[in-house]
Structure formats: C-alpha cells, structure tokens
Image (cartoon, grey):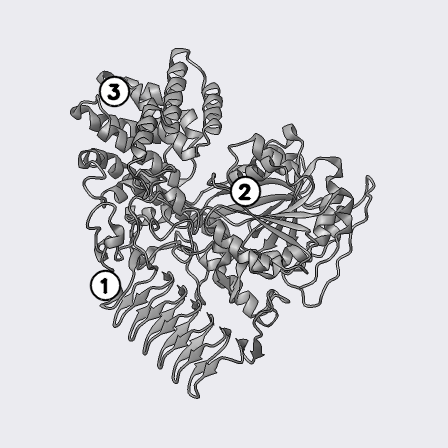
Amino acid sequence: MNSAKDNRNVSTKGELKAIVLADLFDAPFQPLSLNRPRCLLPLCNVPMIEYTLELLATAGVAETIIVCQAQADKLLDYIRGSRWSRGNSQMKVVVRSTPVGSTVGDALRAIDHSSTVLFDFILCTGLAISNMDLTTLVAAHSARSRDGLHIMTMLLQETAPGHPRQDKSDESVYFIEPSMNRLLALSSHASVPRAKCISVQSNVITNHAEVEVRADLSDTNIAICSPDVLALFTENFDYHDMRRDFISGILELTDVLQKDIHVHVLSGPSVQPVSPTVPSATWGSQAPDPLLSISSSGYAASVTDTAAYDAISRDIISRWAYPLCPDNSPTGEVVYNYSRGAVYKTKSVRLDRESRVEHHVILGADSHVANHAYIADSVLGERCAIDEHATIRNSYLFDGTKIGRNSVVERSILGERVTVLDNVVIERACLIGDDVTVGPNVRIPAFTRLARVPPHRGASLANRMSDGSDSESDSGSDSDISDAAGGVQAAARHTSPAAGADSQRPFDTQVLGLRGVGYVWDVSSARPGSADFGDDHDGADDSDDSDNGDDTIAHQLHKLHTIGSSLNDAVLGDSDQEDEFGGEDDDADAEQAAAKPSMQDEFEREVHLTVKRGCDENLSAPQSTIELRGLRMAYNKDKEDMCKCLMQEVLRTVDIASLATSVPAALKKWGPVIEGFVGDGREQLDLMDTVERHCALEDGIDNAARSRLFVRTVYMLYQLDIVEDVAIIAWHGRAQKKPADEVSADLLCALEPVVDNLNETDESSDGDEEEDDDNEDEDEDEDSE
C-alpha cells in the first residue's frame, strides 16, 4: 500500500485532490488530545492521520488539504517531519489552518472561499481507516456525475446495530434504492435522548418500486464529492453537521435542488483479494449503475470515540483490515515480528523469563515486561515499563508509560509518560492524559478522566469541544459535568483557591494518591451510554439499566451527557482570558477600544432591532428567521450565540405586569424562530441556562416576578416542543449541584413542581406502555389458543 496509482479517470478534469477534516469539534478523547490534535494520537502505535494519508495516496490523490483549527502548528510540524514532505513523495500534503469556525460546515466553507478545489475530490476525516482502493469509487462517481445531478458518493460499512464501531452520538437509518444505490432519505438524530420513532417523506416509499431501510450501516466518513458540495455549504450557512444538516437537507429538497447522493456499501473483508472492474467511461441510458461493478468487500471505519478506537485496534491486530496490520504499518518505520496468538513485538523488546504476554498484544520498541507481569489484548507504545506482578488487560499505553508493582489497568487508555505507582487499580474506561502520576495504593473509579492540568472554570466549551484545542493554561473539562449515577465527582477534587488561579491548585491527591500528580476532570463509577470498550461490550441498549435501580432524574441526566454532551457553550473571546503582555502604552488603546462598540455589542444591538421590528411590524416567523440568519452570517456567530441573544431579547418584550398573557403571546410568536436555533439535548440545556440567567439577573424585573417569569417561560417552551421534558429534568438536576453563585435557589425551588409533574408523567407513560405490551401479549396468547 506504499505506492500511489495514477487515476486516469479524472486526469482530464485536473489532478485529484482530497480534503481531510482534522477537527470533528467534539471531545470524546479529552484529555488525551490536550497536547496534540486527535488525528496524531497513535492507533496501534501509528498516528491515525497516517492511515488516512496512505489511503488517499493509494487512490492516486495528487494533493491533500488537511483543514485544522485546533493546534494546527503541531500538525504542520508533524507533516514537515514526515515522509510526506520528502522529495520522493508522490502526494503533496498541505495543512490549512482555519482560525474561525466551530463546525464541519465552517471548515468546508473556508475551503470553498479559497477556490483551491475545482473538480471532484475525496472528503474524509483524519481518523478514517480503510484498506479499500478508492480509485474505482472515484471513477464511478465521475462517470455518474457527468449529468450534473450526482454530487456525492458515500462509503458505508455494514455494521450490526450496537457494534462498538457505530457512532454512539448518532443513530442513522438509511433509505436506499437498491437498483441504483441511490440514497433516498436519511433519518439521523442524536442517540440521547433516544427517539421512539423516525419520520420520512411519504414519496420516498410511494415513488419507488423497492426501498431498503437499513439501520445496520455505519458512516465511514469517507465520500467522493463534486465541487457542488462546497458551494451548497456556502449557500446554506446553517449546514453544520454532514449527516444531520447537509445530507438530510439535500435529500429533503431533492425535487427542488435536483441533486442526488449515492452510497457504496462494504459488507466486510474478503477472504481472497478482489480486483474490481473499473467502470466504462461512457454509459448508455440502460447501463447498470457503475457502483454495482465495484467489489463490496473491504474494510472502512472511522475513530469516532473510544469504543470505536478499541474496536478498530482489535480489527487491525487481528488482521481483519489486511494489509493494514502492525507488521505492515503505513509508515514502515518500526518493524514488528508476528508471533503466535497475534503478538507483535520488535527486537528491542525485553521480556523477562516469567512474564506472560498472551493474545492480541503489540509491544513497542524498547519496552520492558518484568517477571510475573501479565499483558493481554493491549497495545504498549515505545519505552513502556511494566513492573513485576502488574496486569494490563484490554488497555492502550502510549509511549513512555510506566506501571508499578501489583498494579492493574483494565480497559483504559493512558497517555504518554504516565506513571502508575505500586498497588494501583485503574478500573475500566478511564482516560489519563500525558505526564500524570497515580498512586500509590489507590483505586481509580471507572470512567475517570485525569489530566496534568486542572479543569479551567473560565474556559469556553466551544474551545474545548475542538478536540485538543486547549492549551496548558486554559484547558479542562467543565467543573460541573455530572456524575448522575452516584459515582464520585467534584467532592473528590479540590476547589480553586480563587477565580483565575487554577494553575496554583494543589494536585487532587485525594483521588490520585499521596504522590499523585494531576487533576480530576470527571469521575463516574457507572455511566449509561458512555463509550466503554473491551471484551464484554455487547452493544446493549443504553436504556436498559434496570439493574442499577436508577431510572429517574439521574438516569435521564446521564443520557443527556453521554457522548459529545456539554454544559454551556461560551462565545469566543472569554473575558477571563486577559492579555499577559499589556503595559502602560496599552492604556490609550484601551480607552479608544472602550469608546467603540465591540462586535458583540453591535451584534446584540442588531438582534434587538430585529426583534423590535418583528413586533412593531408583526413580521411572520419565516421573515424574522431570514433576517436573523443573515445577521448570524454577517457577524460569524454560532447557532448557540444567536439562540442566547434572541431568547434574551424575546424575554425583554414580555410585560412583567401581565405575565399570564404576555409570556404565551411572546413565545407563540417567536417560538418557531427560536426552535430553528435549538437542536439536541445539549442545546436545550444551554437554552435553559439562558432563561435562568435572564430571570435571575435582568434589571427591571421585580424580585417577586422573577420566579413566575421563569416558570411560565420554561412551561411554554415545553408546551411548544422547543425544550423536551427530559432536558428540563436534566437541567434541574444538574443545577442543584451548582454553587449558589451560579444559579438562583429561588428559581430552582419554583421549578420543582413542574419537574415533579414531568417525572410523574414519564412514569405514568412508561406504565401505560408496559400495560399495552402486556395486553398485546395476552391477545397473542388468546389468538394462539
């Protein structure tokens, strides 16, 4: 796989290019990615970006553009020192930094504005792994796209529902026309809270003779695209996510846009090598679909979370992705010897006589395993040291990690230079960042995240959600990420001595041990739906948690905070982050800056005027939505920024003297507009935060009216289906754990009757469903008799 092939099918249209998205704008690998972009994390001791670049080079790509926002300088340094910058490299690799933007859509719009991609291109993430030769897929896409209607060919992999490789943050159902491999509809929604039904346009079923409905497909995040894809992202600045926004939007407007999306489904690795037939350059009106002539055998996946990381690692070690395997790595810099039981090790590895290294293990160069140590189903990086009687199972240790005597590491990932002292037990699904020291004589609960730097209270989540975007001075997880299942949380960590003094915090020795070096980001002994991994991962339904007896507020709260969840997305430019280099000469500049309205002030003023004009002129919801979307694009604001500002302005139109009528009137008018900026559970939690802060702090509201305004607003948002009952319950449970200066106790108390009522409603509905199921079972029994 080290030689590039000529792609003659696209030579007439220019050199084939690829766009690689290095940022996925989520944080399942924090704090492992604090010191480097996620795509540089090792997978089987090879940086993940190398698998992607090797795939593209094999497809004949002439130039690859890596779009990166978080720590682009480190990615650039890596590429400059890699084989891709040598004179004999057949593929040019360019790293392009996008300083503004927080979504996939923003990154693609930046590429479109640069006009560097003019022909068909390959789009993938920097975490894509595949042994497929994309040359034939590119050729089939080019043959089909000549009519100008076909704009994308998605590469999907057959994967059983609940498989670790499935994206845990998203549930997708594909509607496919099998005769042409055309994607007719895509129902993609957040997995938490779980949807009870899916909706699809009726013409998807009625207008086609045969439709496949498939929930067993995982998106490999690899696609062949026409330039129209970039143009459509630019024209529709509300497109953020590829599946939920772009693909779903194109399919819903197929009749209007006249654009088609096709799919190619891989069924799995083949036993014998397959040489697919390249489709003909011309196609008659009755020609078969060019995708049908391409082999469906192959392996493709994307490292979306830690569970996928574990599953893909196992596939590579077990040679299911051959020729991608440890003894034939893309870089070829380290030579592994394969031995019985799928154990890979280099010649420099030292195994003491009585050490035990069993099945599915990779041992990096210069690693040492002492007597009576046990390692199975694990990957060790370079220069790792395992002391006597230590046990490593189903875990991943990066370079320079040391494990002390009698210590146990179960199904966890440990970053570089982590030191685990003697008699330490690290339970399953823990993530430990670089340079952390743990121990001695402690037990780290399951699902714990530890980092060398403290969680910074003032750091905006918008920055943290870009995996690896944190610097050592402002990185961290939210201090109030909930432990709703009853595990240890903030009580186990020290509080900051003062605001802005996180760097002076003492280490969290209560959790890490007397000699511990590091801080606790999150501790949770049982997390429904978390990205767990290991042999006993059975992909069970996350809602099946009857054994822990917790199916109320705490359980629902965990569901909202599963993969990719967050608490409060703050706008860029945190007020806590001050210029360290200010001096006497800055005073005049500060006075001039204070005299001028900031971009944020101008944006808020424009939203205020838009809401005022909407009320004065009685504009319809679509008209107001168009104006607000224009403002958001003009000021380059996130959807969350717009929602926060809009909600505050709508609440300011409420007549405090007559809340009973003014609150419903205001929200019925502006509810459809607000709903356009609110999506999943995380955004609903943000909206609840905005309402609470406005009702608690806004000037001009009588203290006696604050609680009534808050309760009526929340209830109307629920009645209008803008905020779900699960989000209200989850927000209330989380807010009760916040410090008194961050949430109003009076407002929480006033909301309790609403929360109690929602809980009773949920319990009664669950009881009705169980009763209906019992009745159906009885009817079936009677029919059988």
Residue 447 visible in the current orientation: yes
Name the residue: 32% across, 24% down. Answer: 595
Task: Residue 243: give its label.
Answer: 2
Q: Nearer the viewer, mark 3 or mark 2?
A: 2
**Who is closer to the viewer here, 414 or 282?**
414
Q: Position of residue 611 (x, y in %)?
A: 38, 19
Name the residue: 28% across, 75% down. Answer: 423
Name the residue: 43% across, 45% down. Answer: 194
Query: Tag 2 or tag 3, which sits nearer the N-term?
Result: 2
Q: Position of residue 733 (x, y in %)?
A: 26, 44
- The disc labelled 2 sits on which kind of residue? Arg
Identify whether 683 is placed above or below 398: above
Q: Is residue 508 left or right of residue 286?
A: left
Q: Position of residue 484 (x, y in %)?
A: 29, 51
Q: Nearer the viewer, mark 1 or mark 2?
A: 1
- The disc labelled 3 sits on which kind of residue? Leu
Provide the residue designation for mark 3.
659
- The disc labelled 1 sits on which kind of residue? Thr
How far apart are labels 1 and 2 at the CA level?
A: 43 Å
Provide the residue designation for mark 1.
509
Query: Tag 3 or tag 1, which sits nearer the N-term?
Result: 1
Q: Nearer the viewer, mark 1 or mark 3?
A: 1
How far apart are labels 3 and 2 at the CA level?
A: 41 Å
Q: Residue furthest front?
A: 585
Identify whether 380 is placed above or below 746: below
